[in-house]
Amino acid sequence: MILHKTVHMDRAEISTRFHHALHRRRWLCTNQKLVRTFISYCTLHNSQSHRLTAALMELLLLQMEVQQDCGPSKLFVS
């Protein structure tokens, strides 16, 4: 009985993670322009404040994820 509950909880957790990832990908695809704007801002002001370097790297990783997920051959409609 305990194993059954564990398997059921694992399935629920996997489902929750999948829906969270799907929501995140959709948000990124919808807000590509916002991500690009933040990248431009960080690039422009990075020379004055090197604290923006970490934010710029994270934004560039998000941009790469957007390009991979939202490419013309990889549109995911659910």
Image (cartoon, rainbow, N blue to C red):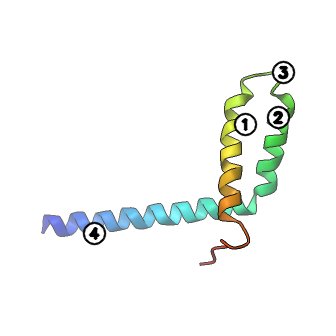
Q: Which residue is mark 4?
A: 8
Query: Which of disc 3 and disc 1 is earlier in sequence?
Result: 3
The span from disc 4 to disc 2 (Cα, nearest Å) is 47 Å
**Image quarter of the N terminus:** bottom left
Which element type, helix, strand or loop, lies under badge 1?
Answer: helix
Query: Which of disc 1 and disc 2 is earlier in sequence?
Result: 2
The span from disc 3 to disc 4 (Cα, nearest Å) is 52 Å
- Does the residue at mark 2 contact the one at mark 1 (Cβ under 8 Å)? yes
Which element type, helix, strand or loop, lies under badge 4?
Answer: helix
Residue 23 tag number = none
Residue 48 tag number = 3
- Name the residue rendered at 69%, 57% in the picture: 66
The span from disc 1 to disc 3 (Cα, nearest Å) is 14 Å
* Res. 38 image quadrant: top right
Residue 43 tag number = 2
- Name the residue rendered at 71%, 51% in the picture: 63
- Name the residue rendered at 29%, 64% in the picture: 9
* Amino acid at the residue labelled 4: His
Q: Left or right: 12 with respect to 17? A: left
Query: Which of disc 2 and disc 4 is earlier in sequence?
Result: 4
